[in-house]
């Protein structure tokens, strides 16, 4: 026997919508007081535009010329000032890598042999990555200190300490 349909009774419709649960918020602009995207946009709006335009630290380019059998780096003093390193340390590094003798005269460095600017740029970049930039935070705010018999790179930004190979 088939089932009888139940008679439908009209249900009463609610006259007003139920109110959503309210939470106390200190900010009336957003419903979520700690929305990450909103906080991020607010923080970025407070950073000056110059911070996004140029990097904080750039590795200086070598300006060199060949004079007879020697290569002269004109801006050697500026390079060491930018890297904040002892010129003698950089001279020793470059002389070892170029397998030649080098000396500093005034603001210039002179190396025996003919070397192109691109090769010198690559060596200065390698020196910067190895002896200047912090391997932990990649910041240039470092100092080389000798602790007992070890040469250590100490970062003032993150506090990292990394042993270096001696030249």
Image (cartoon, rainbow, N blue to C red):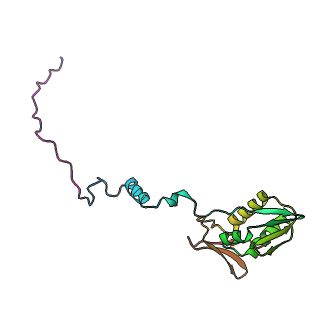
Q: Is 1 left, or right, of 35 in this rendering?
A: left
Q: Quadrant of residue 16?
A: top left
Above or below residue 141? Residue 126 is above
- How far from the left and from the top, in percent, is residue 116? 81, 58
Q: 97 or 34, which lies in front?
A: 97
Q: Quadrant of the C terminus?
A: bottom right
Q: Quadrant of the N terminus?
A: top left
- How far from the left and from the top, in percent, is residue 67? 86, 64
Q: Residue sitting at 82 percent across and 74 percent down?
A: 103
Q: Is 4 left, or right, of 104 in this rendering?
A: left
- How far from the left and from the top, in percent, is residue 101? 86, 71
Start-end of magenta stretch: 3-23
> What is the residue that sits farthest to the bottom in this orientation?
148
Query: What number of labels is visible?
Result: 0
> What is the residue that sits farthest to the top in this orientation?
1
Magenta stretch: includes residue 80: no
Q: Is 83 left, or right, of 137 in this rendering?
A: right
Q: Residue sitting at 45 percent across and 61 percent down?
A: 47
Q: Main secondary structure of the magenta part?
A: loop
- How far from the left and from the top, in percent, is residue 80? 70, 71
Q: Is 26 left, or right, of 126 in this rendering?
A: left
Q: 26 or 42, which lies in front?
A: 42
Q: Quadrant of residue 32?
A: bottom left
Q: Residue sitting at 37 percent across and 54 percent down?
A: 38
Magenta stretch: includes residue 21: yes
Q: Residue sitting at 72 percent across and 72 percent down?
A: 77
> What is the residue that sits farthest to the right in this orientation?
69
């Amino acid at each position: 026997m088939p089932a009888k349909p139940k008679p439908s009774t009209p249900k009463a419709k609610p006259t007003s919508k139920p109110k959503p649960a309210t939470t106390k918020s200190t900010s009336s602009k957003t419903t979520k007081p700690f929305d990450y995207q909103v906080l991020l946009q607010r923080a970025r709006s407070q950073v000056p535009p110059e911070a996004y335009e140029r990097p904080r630290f750039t590795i200086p380019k070598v300006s060199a010329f060949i004079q007879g059998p020697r290569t002269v780096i004109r801006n050697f003093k500026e390079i060491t000032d930018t890297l904040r390193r002892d010129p003698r340390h950089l001279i020793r590094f470059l002389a070892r890598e170029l397998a030649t003798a080098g000396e500093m005269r005034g603001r210039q460095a002179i190396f025996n042999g003919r070397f192109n600017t691109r090769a010198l740029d690559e060596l200065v970049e390698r020196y910067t990555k190895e002896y200047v930039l912090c391997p932990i935070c990649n910041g240039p705010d470092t100092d080389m200190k000798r602790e007992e018999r070890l040469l250590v790179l100490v970062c003032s930004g993150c506090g990292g300490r990394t042993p270096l190979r001696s030249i």
